[in-house]
Image (spheres, rainbow, N blue to C red):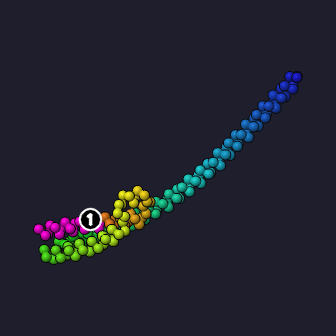
């Protein structure tokens, strides 16, 4: 082969490699732009979903705080009322309160499983279950406080 043919062939190969490199470069840039757009869309979707979940959680948390505030006010009012009673009235009130709370607790005893730990291990905890458990806890504490006050006044 002559040197002109070799030179021409080498130039053709170089031109082909340069053209292929340019095509691959632009393919990489375009695929990067496409991937960036997909990632941006997914991120925006995740942010919207997170915002929606956060708003829902905050609303339920606000409801729970309101419940606790109301419960605290009720307990404070009840305590203030108890402090105004004389010994006989206090005994009568505590007996009535205890009987009513036992009735209310029986409702929770029928709703809650015998072993809460087992239930929580084997089931997904719903908002309704957690609210019911919280109400049971508050009622149990109130019952304990009144029972303790009854014992204190009985002596």
Query: Magenta stretch: residue 145 in it?
Result: yes
- Say which residue appears at 31% left-offset and 64% top-offset: 137
Q: In the rendered image, which quarter is residue 66 located in?
A: bottom left
Q: Name the residue under label 1.
A: 141
Measured as percent of width and height from the top left, residue 64 is found at 37, 65
- Say which residue appears at 65% left-offset and 49% top-offset: 34
- Dot 1 falls on a residue whose secondary structure is helix
Q: Magenta region's main secondary structure? A: helix
- Say which residue appears at 76% left-offset and 37% top-offset: 19
Measured as percent of width and height from the top left, residue 36 is found at 61, 48
**Depth check: 108 or 50 in front?**
108
Q: Residue furthest left?
A: 155
Q: In the shown orientation, is residue 107 left or right of residue 37?
A: left
Q: Residues within 10 Å of mark 1 (few under 14, many from 20)?
A: few
Measured as percent of width and height from the top left, residue 20 is found at 75, 37
Q: Which residue lies furthest to the right in this view?
A: 2
Name the image quarter holding the N terminus. Answer: top right
Q: Residue furthest top?
A: 2
Q: Taking 23 as reference, is 121 above or below it? A: below
- Say which residue appears at 26% left-offset and 74% top-offset: 100
Measured as percent of width and height from the top left, residue 150 is found at 17, 69
**Depth check: 17 or 95 in front?**
95
Specify start and end residues of the magenta stretch as a single range. Answer: 138-155
Query: Magenta stretch: residue 57 in it?
Result: no
Q: In the rendered image, which quarter is residue 119 located in?
A: bottom left
The answer to whether any part of residue 62 appears in the image is no
């Amino acid at each position: 082969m002559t040197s002109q043919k070799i030179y021409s062939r080498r130039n053709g190969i170089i031109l082909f490699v340069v053209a292929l490199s340019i095509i691959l470069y632009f393919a990489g840039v375009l695929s990067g732009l496409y991937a960036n757009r997909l990632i941006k869309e997914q991120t925006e979707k995740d942010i919207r979903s997170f915002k929606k979940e956060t708003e829902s959680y905050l609303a339920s948390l606000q409801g729970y705080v309101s419940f606790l505030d109301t419960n605290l006010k009720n307990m404070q009012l009840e305590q203030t009322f108890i402090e105004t009673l004389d010994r006989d009235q206090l005994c009568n009130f505590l007996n009535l309160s205890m009987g009513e709370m036992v009735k209310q607790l029986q409702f929770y005893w029928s709703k809650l499983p015998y072993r809460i730990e087992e239930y929580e291990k084997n089931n997904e905890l719903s908002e309704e279950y957690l609210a019911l458990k919280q109400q049971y806890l508050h009622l149990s504490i109130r019952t304990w406080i009144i029972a303790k006050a009854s014992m204190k006044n009985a002596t």
